[in-house]
Amino acid sequence: MNTTALATLSICAYLASTLLIIRDIDQSRMQRTALYLAWTAVCIQLLYIAIVFQKNSTFNFGFFSTSSLIAMIVALLLLIAALNKPVEKLGIAIFPIAAIMLALELNFADKTQLLSSYNWAMSTHILTSIIAFSLLNIAAVQAILLAIQDQQLKSHPPKRFIQSLPPLQTMESLLFQMLGTGIVFLTISLVSGFLFIDDLFAQHLVHKTVLSILAWLIFTCLLIGRRRFGWRGQTAIQWTLIGFLSLLLAYFGSKLVLELILHR
């Protein structure tokens, strides 16, 4: 089967879903159609990944391939959450990013970072890291929307998109649910990393470990502060984005420098 055709079809479905959400943001029927298209895009991309995996007999964890895989997992997690939570409008940000990352993988994928070069323990660490990043990515998008919603409600009559979002209290509750789940996987990722990585200095992973631990501390303190001191609003938004920025630099900063700049 032609992988290029599959990837192109998935990209088109992601973009069509985004356009439908934007165009018919107040119409629940069109929202469902947009979600069906997004499910189609994710399923086609999964088929694409399966065919590439079969061809290479392993996963490719190069920069663009990893970015595309994470974007797809983020989209999938959003779709699963949308089955019983009003989070489908996050697709306006997430679905086009998934399309862009898949397009970049299709055109610039590096075939040198293959999973077969890692043992099962490191593979577990990598996969749990990807899931953790994906969940916290959704939380960051949620925090950005929450900030925009809060600002517009205070300053002037909100625009149609903001009016279509759930109430602030619901948005905050969803944010902390995503953070809690993401921290569970981030904890597993960090523990497995300490158990399975032999030499952090030799593997250029010191900065990644430090930034990941910093992100874990920020998110954990935020959850504790929410539970004990009732932290919410701008405090929750700011610390969520700071924590995610630390995690973003940990996950992609090192890969960007090592693979695309230093070519290691």
Image (cartoon, rainbow, N blue to C red):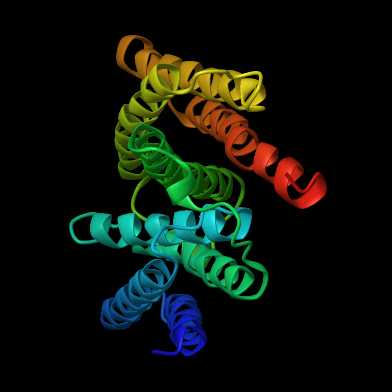
Q: Nearer the viewer, residue 57 or 182?
A: 57
Point out the image quarter for the C terminus. top right
Q: Position of residue 186 (x, y in %)?
A: 39, 29
Q: Give the residue drawn at x 32%, y 55%.
A: 77
Q: Nearer the viewer, residue 239 or 158?
A: 239
Against 131, residue 106 (above or below) is: below
Against 190, residue 259 (above or below) is: below
Residue farthest to the top, as pictured = 228
Q: Quadrant of residue 31?
A: bottom left
Point out the image quarter for the N terminus. bottom left
**In this picture, residue 33 sits left or right of residue 114:** left
Q: Give the residue drawn at x 43%, y 59%.
A: 90
> Number of callouts in the render?
0
Against 62, residue 251 (above or below) is: above
Q: Quadrant of residue 6?
A: bottom left
Q: Nearer the viewer, residue 88 or 256?
A: 256
Residue farthest to the left, as pictured = 84
**In this picture, residue 250 sits left or right of residue 24:** right
